[in-house]
Image: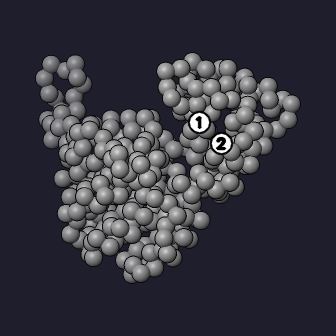
Amino acid sequence: MQSPHIPVLLQEVLDIFSDFESGDFLDCTLGYAGHSRALLQAHKNLKLYACDKDMEALSFSQEFLKDFQDRVCFKHMGFREVLNSIPTHNLRGILADIGVSSLQLDKNDRGFSLQSDFLDMRMDQNRALSAKEVVNSYSKEELERIFKDYGDLAPVASMLAQKIIQARSQKEIASAKELSQIIGKAKLKGRNVTLALLVFQALRIEVNDELGELRTLLENIEKAKLKNCKLAIISFHSLEDRLVKNTFKRWEKDCICDEKAIRCECGKGHSLGKILSKKAISASKEEISYNSRSSCAKMRIFYFR
């Protein structure tokens, strides 16, 4: 049995956790279990907590990992709350791959692809809000907001929102294919990416509250007061990477006084650990050659002392 999804930065993930000896490991975004299976194979004393909100992916992974079933505890939930549902005192590794799986992108009925006959984009299909609802019910101002905040489309956000408003006034926008035709094939000035792709990114982030989920995960990790634990986060767009980068920098600071303060008044001693990746880790040319979607992946590592 093979996973239908190619895990990104797999060798890099294995290298980062190569010194794992024993204890608990949390895969916050199990997906189709490519990373988890490799880690279970590499570390015989690893107990895995595996979390995913996509029931289709979870069902596949339960079968895919059946040889390790005595070492795996599955959690059907979003990663934002998983740390509140597992013991953390023996947690020695955490992995979060914050991206949409190839299978989700490619399946017509999930509505992620530009050519899909559906308009959904929900990672958790129990969620009420879908891309179809956003596109057909959000006001012009709300559409502009998500295009600016989540698609980096500020110069053209108003124009794109107006296009959608005009199109839906004639008939409901029912498919991703229809939406991509409305947006057109133009590219954002100065970037080699189409407006349609950036609109779809913005819609997906809005529908799944991706930044909110990541922010809550980071907050819960901080509250857990972890010791002797490595955290690896793989992100796929600049908004997520910036959030991870800035959080890690804050966690590493020993002094938390205002930068304008003349002298330290906090007493220092506030550092939670150390950043292990001064620069984000990216996919090799070899990996990109057989998995083009890995070209956007960036991984950052933090160690809680």
Residue in front for this viewpoint, 256 or 148: 148
Q: Which residue is at a point 42% across and 43% down the rendered structure image?
A: 295
Q: Would you place residue 47 above or below residue 228 in this image?
A: below
**In the image: residue 257, left or right of residue 223:** left
Q: Which residue is at a point 27% across and 76% down the rendered structure image?
A: 44
Q: How is the image coloured?
A: one colour
Residue in front for this viewpoint, 130 or 219: 130
The circle drawn on residue 114 is 2
Indicate the amino acid at tag 2.
Leu
- Residue 63 shows in this picture: yes
> For mark 1, what is the residue?
197
Res. 46 image quadrant: bottom left
CA separation, marks 1 and 2? 8 Å
Mark 1 lies on a secondary structure that is helix
Mark 2 lies on a secondary structure that is loop
Report x, y in % for residue 22. 23, 71
- Residue 86 shows in this picture: no
Label 1: how many residues lie within 10 Å, few (<14), some (14-19) or many (20+)? some
Residue in front for this viewpoint, 23 or 115: 115
Indicate the amino acid at tag 1.
Leu
Q: Would you place residue 64 above or below residue 256 in this image?
A: below
